[in-house]
Image (cartoon, rainbow, N blue to C red):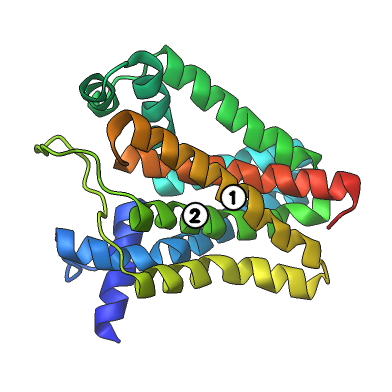
Amino acid sequence: MRAHLRLLLLAVQFYTRLPVPAWVDYSDELLNKATVYFPLVGWLVGGVAAGVFAGASFLFRNADVALLLSMVASILLTGAFHEDGFADVCDGFGGGWTQDKILAIMKDSRLGTYGAAGLGLLLAGKFLALRGLPAAAVVPALLVAHPLSRATALTCIFSHHYARANEDSKAKPVAKKMRLGELAAGLTLGALPLLAYAAWQHRPGVLLVLLPLAVAKTILARYFQRWIGGYTGDCLGAIQQVAEVSCYLFLLAGFAWKFI
């Protein structure tokens, strides 16, 4: 039990800004094992975002302000970890035309035009999609999308190889290995909130969200494979962000067309 707790806390330490006990040490091997708990970090981030939205909605009686504060809370909690990955991917693939150039641009800490434009559109997409949902559906959407999007990113670790052949001290640490049993456990943790929502609200149609997530992951992973021969940590962040927005857009369409 202590070993699993250590891995969970390591995942929290790596993917959020929350402090953890000093006895939680880091190694590449432990990070690979801790990846199975990535969706549980989504439970935490989604819970905080949903809590801030609910509290701000009650306090300010304004859904727009509540959504903005909810997004701020999630970004502060994660340190914009995945948003940074998405922006780096936009810069790298937007400005590079060879594997080496793309990887070099993604490693650069500076934000370029492609990254700024992509990040702005991403955040606007999140806000507008959530804003279009019925008020009662926003909290469930946050609770479902954060774990499920992180579970989607796990599938890339399992199905593809890490792209950086020559790592250096400036390369971001990232999980690079995952066994089938670990993937199954991670996917289960990521899907539990979705299954609970479908059962609680008697909305089996919401399970169809798995289809656009699978499509988005497949397209992105193949694109990364074609250009850089695999994935990087930034690529995983981009997959998580695209999957999160895809969840919100699917729910928005589902409520609009009444198929969920």
Q: Is residue 202 left or right of residue 155?
A: right
Q: Is residue 65 left or right of residue 121?
A: right
Q: Nearer the viewer, residue 188 or 83?
A: 188
For marks 1 and 2, the one nearer the N-term is 2
- Asked if 104 appears above or below 253 in the picture, the reply is above
- Asked if 95 appears above or below 1 in the picture, the reply is above
Q: What x and y, as percent, mark residue 254?
A: 82, 49
**Three-letter amino acid code at the position of disc 1:** Leu
Label 1–label 2 contact, CB within 8 A:
yes
Give the position of the C terminus as an image quadrant.
bottom right
Label 2: state its secondary structure: helix
- Asked if 245 appears above or below 51 in the picture, the reply is above
* Crowd class of label 2 (few under 14; some 14 to 19; many from 20; radius 10 Å): many
Label placed on residue 152: 2
Q: What x and y, as percent, mark residue 100?
A: 20, 23
Label 1: state its secondary structure: helix
Q: CA distance from mark 1 to mark 2?
A: 7 Å
**Residue 205 visible, this angle:** yes
Q: Residue at x 46, y 66 (%)?
A: 40
Give the position of the N terminus as an image quadrant.
bottom left
Q: Residue at x 44, y 72 (%)?
A: 184
Which residue, as the protein is rendered here, is positioned at the far right? 258
Q: Residue at x 29, y 40 (%)?
A: 232
Q: What x and y, as percent, mark residue 136?
A: 81, 56
Q: Is residue 45 left or right of residue 134?
A: left
Label placed on residue 213: 1
Q: Quadrant of residue 87?
A: top left
